[in-house]
């Protein structure tokens, strides 16, 4: 993320998006998961494009080092720590690995193929964002060499989405470093970058009053796409029309809400919480990955909830419980890392979100 001057509503939107990830990784009702899945990750990648810049990089080398330091190295850290804990428990329980198994896990980190059991991988979102930002750098350098007009960016983004969709529908082979997902999501990244140049228009047009229409389009598109719902992790999107309407309607609804919230003083407690979530999405995402299948079900079962389906009310309580547990666990670890291990996150020194009111 390149922007040094933070925009409040962008942090709010990122905060809502990470809560969406918590919902996706919970025993939430299936219909809720389908609606959130329709827009959550496209929103993340669009916001990443919105704050993307290469102005402070004189060449590709410093840019690449920054991306390794802020995306890949933290990803490796968050892959290795849970693995070491899991293997330590396995050794004490008599489930030791062979040298070959360890070599395969390390090889997995280098190749980074998601979904391959026994192979290590960094959190897929970080690998995908790394590839997207490399692509963004190449595109912006190219645009300076040949003076690409804005409409060319829109065409490139549209073509990327179409090619990504066709690859998903007809080839659907998992590629190293989430390149297959990156191809599908690059268009959202590019559109986000283009939107940054029209920020004032965006803030004027995306009024909270438009949220109802956008939300209705999102729900309708999701219902029509119910037979083959969107799942970005699996790189499946169903009907292309429903997929795109749902994604952009969901993005519009969230941004309209967040732009409206941007007019409220940021010292309001819920907004401070959203800001904190939005500024720590890397930690929140990476911490959620190892706990959503272990710690969260363990805690929920201890309070009498079923983590495998159940009634609608049970699923809603599980969803709420997962959000609360994630917020507590992720916030604690984010605070510890921000204060005591900022280097692991690619930061030069400890930093915390400002609580100054506007």
Image (cartoon, rainbow, N blue to C red):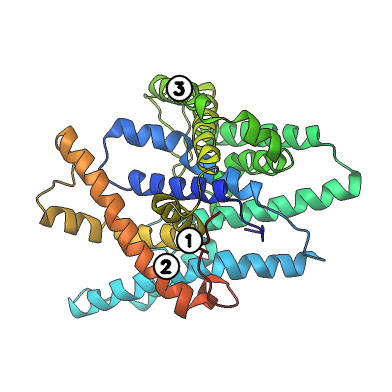
Identify the residue shown where x is 79% and y is 32%: 151
Identify the residue shown where x is 68% and y is 42%: 190
Q: Is residue 194 left or right of residue 38?
A: right
Residue where numbered disc 2 is placed:
334
Which-is-in-front pick, marks 1 and 3? 1
Q: Is residue 6 left or right of residue 217?
A: right
Distance, label 2 to label 3, CA atoms, is 36 Å
Residue where numbered disc 1 is placed:
280
The circle on residue 347 is none
* One can see residue 350 in this view: yes
* One can see residue 294 in this view: no
Quadrant assignment, res 298: bottom left
Image position, residue 56 (x, y; %): 77, 64
Earlier sequence position, callout 1 versus callout 3: 3
Quadrant assignment, res 170: top right
Of residues 202 and 112, the one drawn nearer to the viewer in this rendering: 202
Residues packed near mark 2 inside 10 Å, few (<14), some (14 to 19) or many (20 plus):
many
**Residue, far left:** 304
Image position, residue 327 (x, y; %): 34, 57
């Amino acid at each position: 993320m390149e922007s040094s001057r933070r925009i409040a509503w962008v942090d709010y939107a990122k905060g809502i998006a990470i809560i969406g990830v918590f919902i996706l990784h919970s025993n939430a009702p299936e219909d809720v998961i389908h609606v959130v899945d329709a827009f959550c990750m496209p929103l993340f990648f669009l916001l990443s494009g919105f704050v993307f810049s290469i102005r402070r990089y004189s060449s590709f080398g410093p840019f690449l080092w920054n991306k390794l330091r802020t995306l890949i190295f933290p990803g490796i850290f968050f892959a290795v720590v849970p693995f070491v804990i899991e293997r330590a428990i396995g050794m004490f329980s008599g489930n030791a690995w062979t040298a070959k198994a360890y070599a395969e896990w390390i090889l997995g980190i280098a190749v980074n193929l998601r979904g391959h059991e026994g192979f290590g991988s960094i959190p897929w979102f970080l690998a995908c964002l790394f590839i997207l930002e490399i692509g963004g750098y190449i595109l912006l350098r190219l645009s300076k060499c040949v003076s690409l007009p804005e409409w060319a960016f829109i065409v490139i983004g549209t073509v990327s989405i179409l090619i990504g969709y066709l690859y998903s529908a007809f080839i659907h082979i998992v590629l190293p470093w989430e390149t297959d997902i990156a191809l599908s999501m690059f268009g959202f990244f590019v559109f986000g970058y283009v939107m940054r140049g029209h920020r004032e228009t965006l803030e004027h047009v995306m009024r909270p009053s438009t949220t109802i229409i956008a939300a209705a389009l999102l729900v309708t598109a999701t219902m029509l796409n119910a037979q083959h719902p969107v799942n970005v992790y699996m790189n499946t999107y169903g009907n292309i029309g429903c997929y795109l309407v749902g994604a952009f309607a969901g993005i519009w609804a969230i941004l309209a809400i967040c732009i409206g919230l941007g007019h409220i003083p940021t010292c309001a407690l819920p907004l401070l919480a959203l800001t904190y979530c939005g500024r720590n999405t890397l930690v929140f995402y990476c911490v959620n990955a190892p706990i959503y299948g272990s710690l969260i079900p363990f805690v929920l079962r201890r309070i009498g909830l079923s983590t495998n389906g159940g009634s609608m009310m049970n699923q809603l309580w599980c969803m709420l419980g997962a959000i609360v547990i994630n917020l507590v666990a992720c916030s604690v670890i984010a605070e510890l890392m921000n204060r005591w291990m900022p280097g692991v996150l690619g930061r030069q020194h400890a930093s915390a979100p400002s609580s100054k009111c506007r």
